[in-house]
């Protein structure tokens, strides 16, 4: 096309070349170097969808009339009033002033849950935290829905920051060269390797994993889902009962210990607390030996299979792995703690290509990134040094305790040894992220969101979060602004030149916050006196200076901006992992734990006196799982894992996601045995339900799942329909069903994977899917 142009961009699921004519998107093309490019990129073509995009600022009808005195119960149901930017910004500024003056900044909850943009400047988290921080403060959140339990427990056990720990995983090539056995607790789902925080220049996880079979490495997939590991590795499948992993790990440890197959020298030199763990393992302290017979009843893996695996582990060099999903359950801290204990007993931790890797199959470069990791810091927008409050100096909540905070202002709770109090939130400001996707028990969330005086949401699309807001600001996508992409997890850097003009009246987060800061009297402090392009150039030049200090040469900004993605890996040294240095010399390279060693027993945690997280890893049976009484009413364990067709809920309206649905609903998988019991066939619509909620989903019958399990991925935009006294999600969002319960008092993380349901064929008239259409509006207001 004569007037078309091609511009590079960077997303969390790949770097692309975007063909456009400045007004429309014509095609999305991946780079030749990306041999395993994901189909998610095709959905970018729907970035200008008129049904899903927010065209101009919107105000909830009763909020437009009554402001902070309006009733929040109307959120999600009322019409919106289209208004000008001037009117919307004035209303938002007034709400922020009112809240600060009458209740203080601890009444403002400012949130953004990552993944909104791979750009370094137009990064919603950085933008909102900078804005609210410079306005005087706010209530923040700590940890992530993805891995909160692991983040907290592994800091106690290894003293290594979690994202560094998972990045430092042996590559499949190293495992192929040094291990004979690769045991994957929770699998290593290749669909999750489609994404990488901050962008990715080349997907190659399948190619890497395929080396294992040719090298003769035995792979064991311990998961309720067989295709959590690719078929190319010919893995042995042990279809464990969901939430039973700690019991299996304990039984493996028990068998190793009883048969003197554990590495006593490693335990003595590199760990503390094994002697305090043994009485529990053997049953001396509670009368219950954690042996293979005991675990077989809990896991539904045969006693002999457990014993055989333990002997293989005890006699072969091996690598253990654990998925992030296994800590998103009640008592999720125990899975990571116990896996580390098991790996320590085997004695391979810190060896090249052996030991343990945390999180294969979570995001691409965790496990598949190798050792060519940027040694320099990328430039990033944020608070200046000296303005960032320390954790103890700022008001915060654990991120997954969002609803508890709104429901229980002034109530005390515990987190990681701290006694805290929930603030009384009057204003929520959300920019980037979709809590009506990632939070649990959406019915309870809807009720809790009726409580604050004001809710402000910035988004490009009409997600349920935007539909439940008072003030909605339309935001540009990554294709409608200028930025740069790159991260500490990938050796590619890419310019992100604007491909098309902003949709309708959409503005960037930076423009919106600048307009608010102008009204609130701190515009210069927020903008730093820079425009968008000046910030992009500044962040790139900061990156370039940091790289030069590490011996890495980057092109000038002008050359970078005129070009496409480029690779710096050939200038990077192979990094040495923290646990490798620790193994070489634990005195010279101690871990940042109180003992300087791996803590199988943690005196720190023991002194917290939590009844749901003691001083060493343990099995806790009091949970919602198939081994509980609750399973009599709800006999299917719901696995709400990550989707194949999008990143979380992003671009759910896009072609890749929509074409995968069944009759417009998210598809759910269960095996033929469970389907036949309920009279279900491929392509049917079924109702999933429990005592928390209900949703519809399309039926896919699959032999890849064990009995008693149903898989419904997250990310379908929540589409609630009022049916008499009950609410039905018509679209297939599993968080209409999941429990909003903290993992334990230690981490208070998300426990979505402890969830039981029942299903039945849906025979009624199918409700329309309305989330990809514009909400009802009143006449525009100037």
Image (spheres, grey):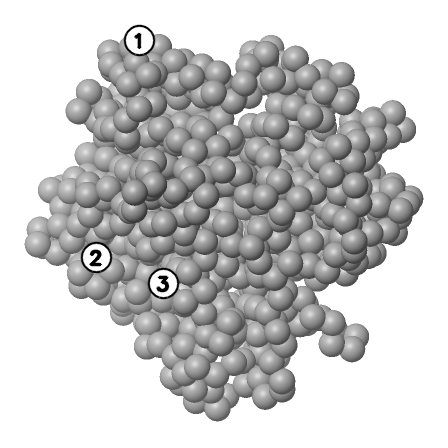
Q: CA distance from mark 2 to mark 1?
A: 42 Å
Q: Toward which corner of the image does residue 311 lie, by quadrant?
A: bottom left
Residue ID at (37%, 43%): 20
Indicate whether 402 appears above or below 183: above
Toward the viewer: 645 or 143? Answer: 645
Q: Is residue 647 left or right of residue 331?
A: left
Q: Toward which corner of the image does residue 570 lie, by quadrant?
A: top left
Q: Which mark is residue 549?
A: 1
Residue ID at (48%, 33%): 481
Q: Is residue 39 visible?
A: yes
- The residue to which callout 3 is attached is 223
- Please identify, in this view, whether the residue under mark 3 or under mark 1 is nearer the observer: 1
Toward the viewer: 610 or 728? Answer: 728
Element type at marker 1? helix
Mark 3 vs mark 1: which is more N-terminal? Answer: 3
Q: CA distance from mark 3 to mark 1?
A: 45 Å
Q: Is residue 100 left or right of residue 728?
A: right
């Amino acid at each position: 096309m004569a007037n078309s142009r091609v511009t590079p961009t960077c997303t969390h699921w790949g770097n692309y070349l975007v063909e456009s004519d400045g007004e429309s998107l014509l095609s999305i093309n991946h780079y030749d170097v990306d041999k395993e490019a994901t189909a998610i990129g095709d959905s970018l073509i729907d970035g200008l969808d008129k049904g899903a995009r927010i065209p101009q600022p919107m105000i909830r009808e009763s909020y437009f009339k009554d402001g902070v005195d309006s009733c929040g119960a109307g959120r999600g149901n009322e019409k919106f009033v289209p208004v000008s930017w001037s009117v919307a910004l004035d209303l938002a500024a007034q709400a922020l002033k009112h809240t600060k003056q009458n209740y203080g900044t601890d009444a403002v909850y400012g949130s953004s849950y990552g993944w909104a943009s791979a750009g370094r400047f137009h990064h919603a988290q950085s933008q909102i935290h900078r804005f609210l921080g410079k306005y005087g403060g706010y209530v923040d959140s700590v940890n992530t829905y993805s891995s909160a339990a692991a983040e907290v427990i592994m800091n106690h056990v290894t003293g290594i920051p979690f994202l560094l720990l998972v990045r430092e995983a042996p590559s499949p090539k190293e495992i192929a060269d040094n291990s004979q056995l690769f045991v994957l607790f929770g699998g290593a789902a290749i669909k999750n390797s489609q994404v990488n925080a901050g962008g990715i220049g080349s997907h190659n996880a399948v190619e890497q994993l395929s080396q294992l079979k040719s090298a003769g490495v035995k792979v064991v997939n311990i998961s309720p889902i067989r295709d959590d590991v690719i078929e190319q590795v010919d893995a042995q499948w042990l279809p464990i009962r969901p939430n039973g992993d700690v019991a299996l790990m304990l039984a493996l440890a028990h068998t190793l210990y009883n048969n003197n197959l554990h590495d006593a020298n490693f335990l003595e030199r590199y760990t503390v607390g094994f002697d305090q763990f043994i009485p529990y393992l053997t049953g001396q302290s509670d009368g219950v030996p954690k042996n293979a017979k005991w675990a077989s009843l809990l896991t539904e893996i045969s006693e002999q299979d457990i014993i055989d695996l333990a002997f293989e582990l005890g006699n072969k060099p091996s690598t253990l792995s654990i998925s992030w999903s296994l800590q998103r359950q009640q008592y999720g801290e125990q899975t990571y703690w116990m896996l580390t204990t098991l790996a320590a007993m085997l004695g391979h931790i810190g060896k090249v290509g052996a030991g343990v890797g945390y999180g294969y199959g979570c995001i691409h470069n965790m496990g598949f990134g190798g050792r060519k990791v940027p040694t320099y810091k990328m430039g990033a927008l944020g608070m200046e040094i000296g303005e960032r409050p320390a954790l103890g100096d700022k008001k915060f909540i654990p991120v997954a305790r969002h609803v508890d905070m709104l429901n229980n202002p002034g109530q005390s709770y515990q987190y990681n040894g701290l006694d805290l109090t929930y603030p009384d939130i009057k204003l929520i400001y959300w920019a980037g992220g979709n809590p009506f996707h990632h939070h649990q028990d959406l019915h309870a969330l809807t009720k809790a969101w009726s409580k604050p005086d004001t809710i402000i949401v910035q988004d490009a699309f009409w997600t349920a979060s935007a539909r439940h807001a008072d003030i909605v600001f339309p935001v540009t996508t990554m294709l409608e602004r200028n930025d740069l992409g790159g991260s500490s997890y990938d050796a590619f850097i890419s310019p992100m030149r604007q491909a098309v003009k902003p949709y309708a009246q959409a503005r960037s987060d930076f423009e919106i916050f600048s307009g608010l800061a102008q009204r609130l009297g701190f515009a210069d402090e927020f903008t730093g006196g820079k425009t968008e392009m000046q910030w992009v150039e500044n962040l790139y030049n900061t990156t370039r200076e940091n790289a030069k200090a590490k011996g890495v040469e980057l092109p000038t900004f002008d050359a970078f901006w005129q070009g496409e993605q480029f690779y710096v890996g050939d200038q990077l040294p192979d990094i040495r992992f923290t646990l490798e240095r620790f193994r070489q010399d634990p005195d010279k390279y101690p871990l940042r734990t109180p003992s300087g060693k791996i803590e199988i027993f943690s005196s720190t945690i023991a002194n917290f006196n939590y009844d749901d997280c003691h001083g060493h890893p343990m099995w806790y049976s009091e949970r919602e799982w198939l081994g509980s009484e609750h399973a009599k009413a709800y006999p299917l364990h719901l696995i709400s894992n990550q989707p194949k067709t999008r990143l979380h809920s992003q671009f759910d309206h896009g072609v890749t996601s929509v074409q995968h649905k069944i009759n417009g609903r998210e598809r759910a998988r269960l095996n033929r045995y469970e389907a036949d019991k309920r009279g279900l066939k491929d392509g049917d619509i079924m109702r999933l339900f429990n005592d928390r909620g209900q949703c519809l989903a399309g039926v896919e019958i699959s032999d890849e799942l064990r009995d008693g399990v149903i898989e419904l991925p997250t990310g379908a935009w929540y589409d609630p329909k009022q049916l008499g006294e009950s609410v039905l999600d018509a679209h297939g969002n599993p968080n209409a069903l999941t429990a909003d319960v903290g993992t334990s008092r230690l981490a208070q993380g998300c426990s979505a994977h402890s969830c039981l349901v029942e299903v039945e064929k849906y025979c009624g008239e199918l409700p329309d899917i309305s989330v990809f259409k514009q909400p009802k509006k009143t006449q525009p207001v100037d």
